[in-house]
């Protein structure tokens, strides 16, 4: 008998000794209570198949019923884990698109729970038992805060722009300044959205300078509206000229066509009252004569992902009647959260405490510095000595294209290692934590900007687990 056949007959023996599906199921009472007979049987069968295949390859004896029951439980638990993880954002970017942008205030979270748990009057008018309009839950609030006649809500600002352009400009031409043909976050480009809306873009002016006469010369009988896009994620400096909203509004009025502003980040209050750079407000565009404005609900506004369209009632009514609105409308959860966020804006002096986005943005650098000092001492003890830990001043960003060139002074922890591979290992270990910690790597240094660190204990509890992941 050669070596191969000897091994093979051992494997055959081992396979004969594999417990049956029933034998495993009989010992899996508590698993069946939790996951049901069908699911447990399926997983057990798959695991036994794997074991059988494995036994052909190597002659191991890991086939006790107890081992198999444990294996079934491990598999079921792993499959039930959510792919979503709460992370600790220490990148210094307050509104990070990849991290889901704004963290919602308590009031919004409670409202989400209420409407999720029960049927609601989303589109039902309780006063006359008739059909209601889902925008009713937020329209008045938006109008009050930005000074518009009417408003409607869709799933994000890209959808808002698509819907506005498709309603007001399909088959028409729109002159847009070359300085405003922006790309926002990789997949969103103004020219692409315009094309998909069914309108033709007429590029006018130069990247750095566009004048009123560029607009008036481009207008013809096919021109359906005038548009201005707030170039929210870059700034052109130097020899520049752009046409003011007021002038564009006047020109549009003279031509009898609407003037649309994509104001992007959706700032509805004066941020300079909190010591932040002054950013133009949605209400300013309306005051300057914009007939329709669009902005995001989850950028500076600090709410759920949504796109807000505000403006003249006759135009909003047309926008609402577009069949595409049905495809772009938000659900009750978004509307419930957005309505609570908007309500908070009625009390500007309470906003910093109530709205996480604003709270992070206005955190005082001295306070962050003190936090960094105390955390540094703890982290230093928890990390292996190959890492050097310092505190360091740094610059946070608002993110999501809001105030792109304005950085906010902040403070953080800077970690370095002699070997690049050690630093990479640390970055990886931080990502593998139960609550992953994401910092930013710059110039061979890992920087943990503490601006958005809401709960210090969470963070320290995570770092306590880092050594196991580094080994
Ligand atoms: C962010 C942004 C958008 C896209 O908004 P989303 O809500 O991400 O869809 C469109 N226009 C401008 C000017 C923006 O800043």
Image (spheres, grey):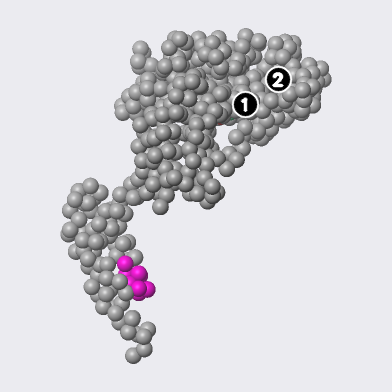
Tell me residue 471's x, y (percent): 40, 52
Let me know if residue 52 is in the magenta part.
yes
Which picture quadrant has residue 324? top right
Name the side, left or right, on which 85 lies relative to 236: left
Q: Residue furthest bottom?
A: 1
Tell me residue 98's x, y (percent): 51, 36
Which picture quadrant has residue 168? top right
Residue count near mark 1 (Cα–Cα under 10 Å), binned few <14, some 14–19, many ≥20: some
Residue under pointer 2: 226
Q: Whole-Å distance between the Cαs marked 1 and 2?
A: 25 Å
Name the side, left or right, on which 289 lies relative to 115: right
Nearest the eye: 424 or 135: 424
Residue count near mark 2 (Cα–Cα under 10 Å), binned few <14, some 14–19, many ≥20: many
Nearest the eye: 224 or 20: 20
Looking at the picture, does residue 218 appear above or below residue 428?
Answer: above
**Residue shown at 69%/21% (left/top)?**
227
**Residue shown at 27%/53% (left/top)?**
73
> Mark 1 or 2 closer to N-term?
2
Which picture quadrant has residue 400? top right
Q: Is mark 2 within 8 Å of ligand 1?
A: no
| Mark nearer the viewer, 1 or 2 | 1
**Residue shown at 58%/39% (left/top)?**
442
Name the side, left or right, on which 228 lies relative to 149: right
Nearest the eye: 248 or 417: 417
Tell me residue 405's x, y (percent): 64, 25
Question: Which element type, helix, strand or loop, lies under badge 1?
Answer: strand
**Residue shown at 60%/40% (left/top)?**
443
Let me know if residue 444 is in the magenta part.
no
- What label sits on residue 404 in the rendered view? 1
Do the residues bearing badges 1 and 2 touch, measured as CB atoms within 8 Å?
no
The stretch in magenta equals: 51-58
Name the side, left or right, on which 106 lies relative to 218: left
């Amino acid at each position: 008998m050669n070596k191969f056949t000897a091994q093979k007959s051992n494997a055959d023996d081992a396979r004969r000794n594999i417990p049956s599906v029933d034998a495993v199921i009989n010992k899996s009472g508590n698993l069946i209570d939790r996951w049901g007979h069908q699911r447990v049987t399926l997983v057990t069968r798959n695991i036994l198949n794997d074991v059988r295949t494995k036994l052909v390859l190597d002659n191991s004896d890991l086939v006790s019923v107890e081992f198999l029951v444990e294996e079934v439980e491990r598999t079921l638990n792993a499959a039930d884990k959510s792919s979503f993880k709460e992370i600790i954002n220490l990148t210094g970017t307050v509104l990070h698109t990849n991290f889901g942008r704004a963290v919602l205030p308590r009031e919004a979270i409670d409202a989400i729970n209420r409407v999720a748990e029960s049927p609601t009057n989303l589109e039902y008018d309780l006063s006359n038992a008739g059909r209601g309009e889902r925008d009713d839950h937020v329209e008045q609030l938006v109008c009050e805060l930005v000074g518009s006649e009417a408003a409607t809500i869709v799933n994000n600002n890209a959808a808002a722009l698509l819907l506005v352009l498709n309603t007001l400009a399909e088959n028409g031409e729109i002159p847009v300044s070359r300085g405003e043909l922006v790309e926002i976050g990789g997949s969103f480009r103004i020219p692409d959205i315009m094309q998909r809306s069914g309108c033709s873009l007429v590029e006018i002016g130069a990247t750095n300078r566009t004048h009123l006469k560029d607009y008036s010369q481009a207008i013809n009988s096919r021109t359906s509206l005038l548009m201005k896009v707030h170039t929210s994620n870059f700034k052109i400096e130097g020899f520049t000229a752009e046409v003011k909203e007021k002038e564009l509004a006047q020109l549009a009025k003279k031509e009898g066509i609407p003037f649309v502003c994509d104001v992007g980040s959706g700032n509805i209050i004066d941020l300079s009252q909190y010591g932040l750079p002054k950013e133009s407000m949605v209400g300013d565009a309306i005051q300057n004569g914009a007939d329709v404005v669009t902005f995001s609900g989850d950028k500076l506004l600090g709410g759920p992902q949504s796109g807000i369209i505000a403006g003249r009632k006759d135009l909003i009514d047309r926008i609402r009647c577009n069949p595409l609105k049905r495809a772009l409308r938000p659900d009750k959860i978004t509307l419930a959260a957005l309505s609570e966020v908007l309500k908070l804006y009625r009390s500007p002096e309470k906003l910093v405490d109530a709205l996480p986005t604003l709270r992070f943005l206005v955190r005082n650098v001295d306070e962050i510095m003190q936090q960094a000092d105390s955390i540094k001492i703890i982290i230093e003890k928890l990390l292996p000595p190959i890492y050097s830990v310092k505190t360091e001043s740094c610059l946070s960003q608002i993110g999501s294209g809001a105030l792109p060139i304005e950085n906010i002074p902040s403070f953080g922890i800077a970690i370095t290692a002699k070997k690049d591979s050690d630093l990479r290992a640390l970055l990886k270990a931080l990502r593998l934590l139960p609550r992953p910690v994401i910092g930013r790597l710059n110039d061979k240094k890992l920087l943990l900007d503490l601006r958005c660190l809401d709960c210090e204990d969470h963070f320290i509890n995570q770092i306590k687990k880092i050594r196991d992941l580094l080994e």
